[in-house]
Image: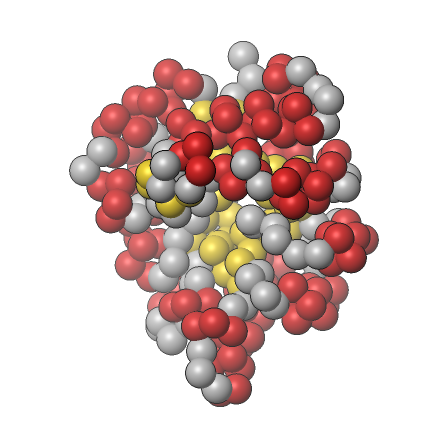
Amino acid sequence: MTWLTDSHIHLSDDEYSGDMEYILTTMDKMKIRACCVSMDNASSKSTLDLSKRSSLVLPFIGIHPEKANDDLDTMVDLITLNSNKISGIGEIGLDKTYVSDEAGFSRQVLVFQKMLSLAEKLGKPISVHSRRTLDEIFSILPSYSIKGVLLHWFSGSKKQLQKAMELDCFVSYGPAMVYADDKQVLLSQTRPDKILLETDGPVKFSKCFGMKTAQIAFLPSVLFCAAGVLNKSYDEMLLAVERNVDSYLGV
């Protein structure tokens, strides 16, 4: 049986802590794996602990741009010491909405570049936050040799999508695509071998999801929508996406 993979979800977030046994059981019953991303040192340790409870949790650790002032040296040590246990590095990236001056953004860039260097050295894929900073990220990525680069929750322009494809990046689409025409248009213009799916839980989604906290059980709906947009059957889309996941993870 082919497994479905959520390429980007924050299962170590406190929002899920009280329901974790149920979530892990659901993942097993629904045949869903999860790339569990982290925000900082504390959540990275929680992610590592969670991965010990289930092999379906694929741990990604790193510093999110919102947490750029977290202890960088400690994170470098954490990644290095657990390099044989982690599936990737993330969530990392840039986001100017979290800073008020150039010094703050420079700190984000410093942290991002350090995470990229580690990913290159250790041969790990990365999960990148790129809200309103795609052009800056595009200017940085070519300096590193990283095989698995995911621009999660891609929301750039068609021109930026083309650039992402030129740089051989993966892009992921989530529950918003079920009701957002612009996301469906972007999906239709994405290279088939670079499409991944995600929930980005615990983000809340509107319309048909009723502003409920994203659950990993939303993922089949995202897959069903993607299949319809690309004129594939559900099973065809599942096989295609999982081939992409394996390529992204380098397995």
Task: Please state if 34 lies on the left or on the right of 113 as rendered.
Answer: left
Viewer-side residue, 98 vs 58: 98
Q: Is residue 18 left or right of residue 212?
A: left
User: Total marks drawn?
Assistant: 0
Please tell me in which quadrant of the rendered image residue 187 appears.
top right
Picture coordinates of residue 143, whole percent (x, y):
72, 68
Hey, which residue is sitting farthest front in the picture?
207
Q: Position of residue 9 (x, y in %)?
A: 43, 43
**Height in image: 196 above or below 1?**
below
Structure colour scheme: secondary structure
Please tell me which residue is depicted at 48% across the width and 54% down the height of the picture.
90
Relative height, residue 23 to residue 42 (above, below):
above
The answer to whether any part of residue 243 appears in the image is no
- Residue 129: image location, x then y, percent: 53, 58
Q: Residue at x 62, y 58 (%)?
A: 120
Q: Quadrant of the N terminus?
A: top right
Determine the residue positioned at 51% across, 73% down: 96
Q: Quadrant of residue 246?
A: top right
Q: Nearer the viewer, residue 80 or 102?
A: 102
Quarter assignment of residue 225:
top right
User: Visible in this render: residue 102?
Assistant: yes
Residue plotted at (43% across, 63% down): 63
> From this viewpoint, which residue is outermost toward the left?
18
Nearest the viewer among 50 and 96 is 96
**48 relative position to 37: left or right:** left
Residue 191, position as x, y percentages in the image? 77, 39
Quarter placement of the C terminus: top right
